Amino acid sequence: NDRPQPKLDRNTEHGMFRFSKEETPLAFVKGFHKLSDVLDTICSYIIVVMLGAMVVITGAQIVCRMAFTALSWSEEATRYLLVWSSFLGASCVYKHSGHISITFVQDMVPAALSKVLKLLVHVICAILFVVVIIYGMKYFGKQGNQLSAAMRLPMKYIYLCLPVGCGFMLV
């Protein structure tokens, strides 16, 4: 193992290890990255399941429309799965810096300033995510007993994708 082992100290505890005060922020960052990786993996699997369900539901709708009676709930289910998978997918893409970005300003400035600009962009995004989480939770709370038209699902769970997706992007 190439990594230096944490110094055992009685000052601060994190899990099973005790870290000196100088190493505490580093341990927090490593734990935060681990949490981010776990959430990213879970989101990826959920997205695959949602996209698969969308394909199956849409295929069943086509078959039923041609041979039987059209499914009244399929379009609504597919729409809500698409919305949820979009917000969860956005969090996975954000983690891997896969969103479209305009970098000509960052490319023109020196490397040190470019790093500062990248950090500034992430700080602005984090502020946006926090605002969307706060207002998304307020909107979630205001939905009350509103139900979707065909499936009769509580709409507050559909709108919950806003704070959940932005919360994952924040992590």
Image: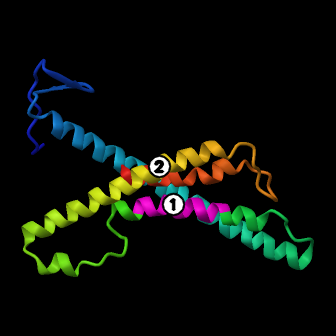
* Residue at the disc numbered 2: 133
Disc 1 secondary structure class: helix
* In the foreground, 4 or 135: 135
Q: Position of residue 99 (x, y in %)?
A: 37, 71
Q: Nearer the viewer, mark 1 or mark 2?
A: 2
Q: Amino acid at mark 2?
A: Ile
Q: Residue at x 11, y 43 (%)?
A: 3
Q: Residue at x 32, y 75 (%)?
A: 101
Looking at the image, can residue 49 be seen?
yes
* Residue at the disc numbered 1: 87
Relative to 61, say whether 81 is above or below. Answer: above
Disc 2 secondary structure class: helix
- Start-end of magenta stretch: 80-92
Majority secondary structure of the magenta segment?
Answer: helix
110 magenta-colored: no
Name the residue furthest top. 10
86 magenta-colored: yes
Q: In the visual, does 145 lie left or right of 71?
A: left
Q: Position of residue 103 (x, y in %)?
A: 24, 78
Q: Position of residue 105 (x, y in %)?
A: 19, 78
